[in-house]
Amino acid sequence: MSFKSAVRVFAAGITAATLMFTAACGSSNTSSDANAGGSDSSDITQQTVTPGTLTIATGDPAYEPWVMNDKPESGEGFEAALAYAVADKLGFKKDNVKWIRTTFDSAIAPGAKDWDLNIQQFGITDERKQAVDFSSGYYKDTQSVVVKKDGKFASAKSLSDLKDAVIGVMVGTQAYTIVQSKIKDDIQTFNDDASLAQALDAGQIDALVTNTVESVYMVQSEQVKDAEVLGRIVGSEDKDGLGIVLPKDSKLTSAVTKAVDDLNADGTLKQLQDKWLAEYTTDLAELK
């Protein structure tokens, strides 16, 4: 082979190698660009409080039908099942989900958190958004009135019939806003639904107002003995719904919001609602 021929062969080899290297780099960049948008679940799994683990908080105790038997790790109950569905969308297997407990108030208070998501029937409000992030709403509940069957307001047929009743609600909830706007300003507040139920049971209040699902559960589980759901308050549906809470400016907020939206779009939310909540939301009187 002549010297010139040898040079041409050598140059061709270098060119081919260069093209192969360039193609490989181009493929790598394309993959990196896709990951940069947060669509790759492996990125999400490394942005949690404990990398590789999704830490989800709920109430202590957690109530049915949101969480069955106070065991969120079972995935039984509407919010427990929803939490695992969201985790799956984010790329976490069930074994990589860790549950912890928090109070309702501490979850929506400003400051650092030791969890990634918190789910315990948090209504989405502008005030709360100043301290924490929210996903899209995953359920729009209404508010209902619970009374004792032998109480003096058991025969009430309208909201105006309750204007002289001593009414209790859980502090900082949608129930407070609804009672104030539709019934009366003078309202007794309690720290949680358990205390609220005890107050009605003990005769400290004449009626309580809380979300419809919880109202029916209170009566069915006899948290208040000899009680009944008087009815669902017309116009009390929460327009923004319940949302999953995340720490303020969490890197997971957009991904969790997308997960909830996708579960809504593909019918999963409706399936979970039908499975866990339907018996708590039908066949109720309407209070105007």
Image (cartoon, rainbow, N blue to C red):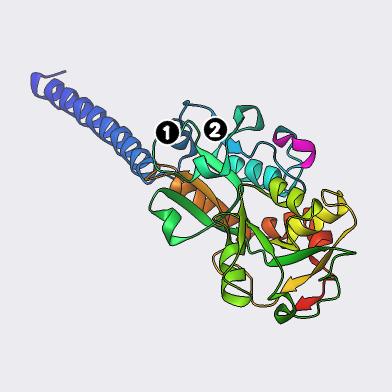
- Residue at x 73% of width, y 59% of height: 205
Q: Is residue 141 visible?
A: yes
Q: Is residue 71 left or right of residue 133?
A: right
Percent of width and height locating residue 170: 62, 54
Q: Which residue is mark 1?
A: 47
Quarter of the figure with residue 72: top right
Q: Is the residue 40 above or below the residue 164 in the image?
A: above
Instruction: Provide the residue span drawn in magenta.
Output: 68-72
Q: In the rendered image, which quarter is residue 188 located in?
A: bottom right
Q: Is residue 151 left or right of residue 102?
A: right
User: Quick one: quadrant of the N terminus?
Assistant: top left
Quadrant occupied by the C terminus: bottom right
Asked which quadrant contains residue 43, the reply is top left
Helix, strand or loop at mark 1: loop
The amino acid type, in three-letter code, at marker 2 is Leu
Check residue 69 for magenta coloring. yes
Q: Secondary structure at mark 2?
A: strand
Estimate how packed mark 2 is, as few (under 14), some (14 to 19) or many (20 or more) residues with alpha carbons within 10 Å.
many
Nearest the eye: 44 or 285:
285
Whether 112 is drawn above or below 181: the answer is: above
* Residue annotated with mark 2: 54
Q: Nearer the viewer, residue 245 or 192?
A: 192
Rendered location of residue 231, percent (x, y)? 79, 71
Whether residues under marks 1 and 2 lie with C-beta atoms below 8 angstroms apart, the answer is no
User: What amino acid type should be assigned to the residue bearing mark 1?
Assistant: Gln
Residue at (70% x, 51% y) in the render = 196
Q: Residue furthest left?
A: 4
